[in-house]
Image: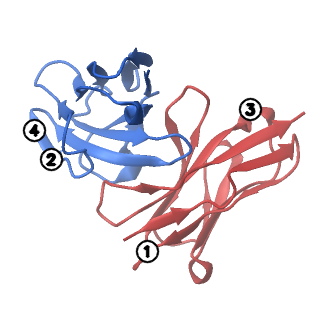
Amino acid sequence: AQSVTQPDIHITVSEGASLELRCNYSYGATPYLFWYVQSPGQGLQLLLKYFSGDTLVQGIKGFEAEFKRSQSSFNLRKPSVHWSDAAEYFCAVGARGSYIPTFGRGTSLIVHP
Amino acid sequence: NAGVMQNPRHLVRRRGQEARLRCSPMKGHSHVYWYRQLPEEGLKFMVYLQKENIIDESGMPKERFSAEFPKEGPSILRIQQVVRGDSAAYFCASSPTSGGTDTQYFGPGTRLTVL
């Protein structure tokens, strides 16, 4: 069975600082990996995804993530955080061809001015 | 180009009442998925429907919960005789085909509170 661990429940950063949100997954084969953002009162928006190929994936809003097979990780990064990035971030893993993703519990990002 | 619509956005019910949650998929989308997000947890898949058909309900509780996606109108998630443990955010997603997670567009959710 696949699983996702987001070890940080809350992360606080200052505006303009760099950001890294951690995600570790457990899956027997090469997974599909996703990062979603959920702004308050909104649905989930797909930030980026990894299926295959280049392990450094670029997404929307200046985010990127790196797939590291040896560490079973897919950490999300942004070089300079904006106040509007304050939201809940979810990592998800999916099996190839499956429509049922497994979500992590989320990391709440707080941005200080 | 409206996105996925869900209503109501907030719903309060007393124990034993029924809750009806509605989801209107994006235009041109005929596949609907329902997820539940319990407090401080990630989303968990409940059910996958196409028009007039339930394709996969492996994530649905066996009792009190039902879902439909009629030929006309929105998809409905129905919870009968609600209990406090049903309090959660319920998200609907839609997709144009039965593709993977990346093709699913999520609605803003319905936050159900059971008193």
Dot label at residue B53: 4
> Element at badge 1?
loop
Q: Quadrant of residue A21?
A: bottom right
Left or right: B78, with B85 as reference point: left
Q: Position of residue A85 (x, y in %)?
A: 72, 38
Q: Position of residue B113 (x, y in %)?
A: 45, 23
Kind of residue at disc 1: Tyr
Let me know if residue A3 appears in the view: yes
Kind of residue at disc 2: Ile
What residue do we see at 37% from left, 43% from top?
B104
> Which quadrant does the N terminus of chain A fall into?
bottom left
Give the residue pinned by disc 3. Answer: A84
Tint applied to chain A in the drawing: red
Select label 3 or label 1 by which is in front. Answer: 1
Dot label at residue B55: 2
Q: How is the image coloured?
A: by chain
Q: Is B40 drawn above or below residue B6 in the view shown?
A: below
Output the chain of dot 4: B
Kind of residue at disc 4: Asn
Dot label at residue A27: 1
> Element at badge 4?
strand
- Report how far apart the C-alphas of labels 3 and 1 lie in the structure: 33 Å
Tint applied to chain B in the drawing: blue
